[in-house]
Image: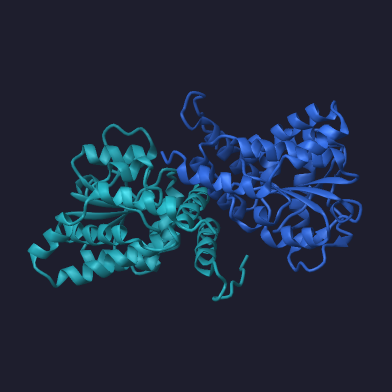
Chain colours: A blue, B cyan
């Protein structure tokens, strides 16, 4: 079903996002639980004012610096991310030299393949995750299955819309984790080195923009972007924005 | 897919609800947009503390009194409501003498039939909505299609998870509208005579419980339940609860 949404509709952006993720279900990319997660995100984004708050922008700049500094950065992609921002994911991988790996909570070979194909249709040259030849220790869910030369070997992992168990397990492996999640007090941003409390559709392109900017700067400036980010203050600021944001 | 959720899991109730609504999609009851709406509701419910706040309980008592006092009360049911609380809807209809009518934003004959059949499997004796022989004036969406002897003739309509356009159109027809919606500042509770800011899975059985209690009382007591409910104060209280509620 295609619904025409006028561009001047007050909620045009969130309606476009909603339709992209519904199309993702039809295309076999997005799980039904991904639609429910999208709805939860919509509510928090609505409370945030559907904007990138200043602390989220600082988190996105720190995320870009971490990805640029890393030896083996990986973007861990699920069905929602692939449905919502495939071009932007490919652009972020290009801007930072990060690998792309599909990793799913509700893993099936068909869905892994559909998501990898979709990202390749959008320009990704190498998408990992089809073969899962390594495991994240201490995780029983399907998300434990990773590529030995991908997430398993990564020093920095960016994970949009993460589950808390894997966030903790990746941290326990000593990896620097960047989590994009609209609920500042859910478990994954609470345990991430860099919690990005922002909508994926704004966060991914903004991290890429910061990466382009930081790539031309000195190592010192990249270090300063990392040091300038205070995760506790950012989580507090996001919560305050949600508490005081416009509710209509 | 069936997922076992331990009853002592901290989010066991919301996880059970989530699985019921996913099953509703598989059974042809719930639209994909219904899953996104469920997610939005989950986020607001989480901020509310997943409880019936006192002002919502007063709204539910007033709703019960309105339904009991009405000449032609109707429960307007969509795919989410049918998937989540079919037994409770039938019990509420029995307790108040209300008719049940299926009314959908994303209307197809198949989905109307699937929902009506599902409610009849749960004990409903007469479900309206299969034939839509009347229209709500001023509405262009499929929700305009209603039964002449159902919503069109109703004096009191209870609508879970409403869209704002229809809420206004029903009000313009002079009907008393009871809306169940977890976002106190979305348009439908803003225009409803009785906005119930509560989760449907708690609201419907609690309205039925109040109806059983009020049925044994005097007309005066039923009038007092209606008069004691202050819609503006209830909307303010719900917003305050969301602003100050536990965010983890």
- On screen, residue B237 versus residue A122, left or right, reads left
User: B223 or A216: nearer the eye?
Assistant: A216
> From this viewpoint, is residue B126 visible?
yes
Q: Residue visible at 55% across and 69% down? A: B10
What is the x, y in percent for residue A120?
81, 38
User: A99 or A68: nearer the eye?
Assistant: A68
User: A26 or B10: nearer the eye?
Assistant: B10
- On screen, residue B122 versus residue A112, left or right, reads left
Rendered position, A247 above or below A187: above
What is the x, y in percent for residue A202?
64, 35
Rendered position, A125 above or below B9: above
What is the x, y in percent for residue B44?
46, 52
- On screen, residue B197 versus residue A89, left or right, reads left
Give the quadrant of the C terminus of chain A.
Answer: top left
What is the x, y in percent for residue A173?
83, 60
Q: Residue visible at 47% across and 46% down? A: A243
Give the quadrant of the N terminus of chain A.
Answer: top right
> From this viewpoint, is residue A29 visible?
no
Q: Residue visible at 49% across and 63% down? A: B17
């Amino acid at each position: 079903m295609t619904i025409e949404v006028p561009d001047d509709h007050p909620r045009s952006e969130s309606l476009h996002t909603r339709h992209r993720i519904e199309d993702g279900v039809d295309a076999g990319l997005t799980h039904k639980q991904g639609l429910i997660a999208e709805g939860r995100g919509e509510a928090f984004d609505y409370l945030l004012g559907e904007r990138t708050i200043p602390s989220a922008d600082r988190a996105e700049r720190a995320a870009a610096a971490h990805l640029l500094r890393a030896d083996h950065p990986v973007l861990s992609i699920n069905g929602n991310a692939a449905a919502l921002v495939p071009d932007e994911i490919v652009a972020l991988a290009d801007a930072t030299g990060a690998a792309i790996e599909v990793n799913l909570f509700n893993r099936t070979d068909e869905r892994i393949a559909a998501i990898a194909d979709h990202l390749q249709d959008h320009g990704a040259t190498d998408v990992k995750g089809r073969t899962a030849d390594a495991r994240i220790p201490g995780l029983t869910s399907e998300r434990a299955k990773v590529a030995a030369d991908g997430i398993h070997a990564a020093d920095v992992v960016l994970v949009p819309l993460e589950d808390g168990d894997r966030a903790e397990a990746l941290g326990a492996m000593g990896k620097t984790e960047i989590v994009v999640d609209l609920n500042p007090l859910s478990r994954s941003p609470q345990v991430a080195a860099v919690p990005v409390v922002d909508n994926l559709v704004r966060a991914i392109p903004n991290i890429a923009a910061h990466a382009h900017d930081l790539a031309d700067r000195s190592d010192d400036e990249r270090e300063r972007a990392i040091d300038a980010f205070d995760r506790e203050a950012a989580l507090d600021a996001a919560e305050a924005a949600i508490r005081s944001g416009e509710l209509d």
